[in-house]
Amino acid sequence: MPEKFKINIFLLASSFYISFQLFANILSTKIALLPILNMSIDGGTVIYPLTFTLRDFVHKTCGKIIARQVIFIAAGLNLIMFGLFWLVGRMTPDPVWGFQAAYEQILLPIGRIVLASIIAQVISELIDTEVFGFKFYRFIGRQFYFRSDCFCWRLAVSHGLADNSDEYCGKINHELGQRAEH
């Protein structure tokens, strides 16, 4: 294949990781009901788990430093996205466009929630990166990613720690919000 048609797999994985981070935050504005389980989930749950796998791939191919940079780039772009939603939401709507209230309800969540969400994402992704690096490089080496028993163990431990840290940050945010209202 000619060089100009080769795909840079790192660039592709990083782009998908950042895109899925942004998509997950937008999709989180929808709370959906899982019909079989009769359980509510936020829409971002559909795509967010893929970010861990993509970030692991970036980490495996380019190292921990690059993986951390990609995490912080995603967080920065999430902040820019929120800022742009806010800015456009504050612009005077065209009088014939009757969706300003819907726009504000869906795309202008409270800034505290957005900031806490981004902080939780960064913390959980950094924890997962550290656990991945510890397990991957210290004990298994380059063979790790292709061994299903090791991969499953790493997923369980690192994602478990990361998900718990994400949930803990969410609880702190909820408590701070409750105190701010009183």
Image: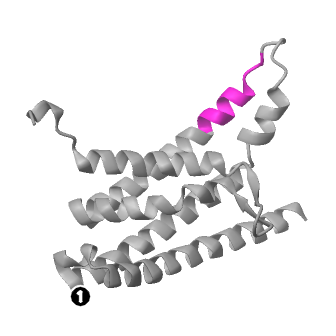
Q: How many marks?
A: 1
Q: Residues within 10 Å of mark 1 (few under 14, many from 20)?
A: few
- Locate the N terminus by quadrant: top left
Q: Residue at x 34, y 76 (%)?
A: 132
Q: Could you tell me residue 65's position as x and y percent?
A: 27, 63
Q: Residue at x 76, y 68 (%)?
A: 174
- Name the dominant secondary structure of the magenta segment: helix
Q: Residue at x 84, y 67 (%)?
A: 178
Report the residue that reaches farthest toward the front: 36
- In the rendered image, residue 160 lying in the magenta stretch gets the answer no
Eyeballing the image, is 39 above or below 134? above
Please name whichever residue, 29 or 182, is drawn nearer the observer in this view of the structure. Answer: 29
Q: Could you tell me residue 3's position as x and y percent?
A: 9, 35
Report the residue that reaches farthest toward the left: 2
Reading the image, the residue beneath label 1 is 139
Please name whichever residue, 78 or 47, is drawn nearer the observer in this view of the structure. Answer: 47
Seen in the image, is 174 located left or right of residue 101? left
Seen in the image, is 83 located left or right of residue 100? left
The residue segment tinted magenta is: 83-93
Q: Mark 1 is on which residue type?
A: Phe
Q: Residue at x 68, y 35 (%)?
A: 86
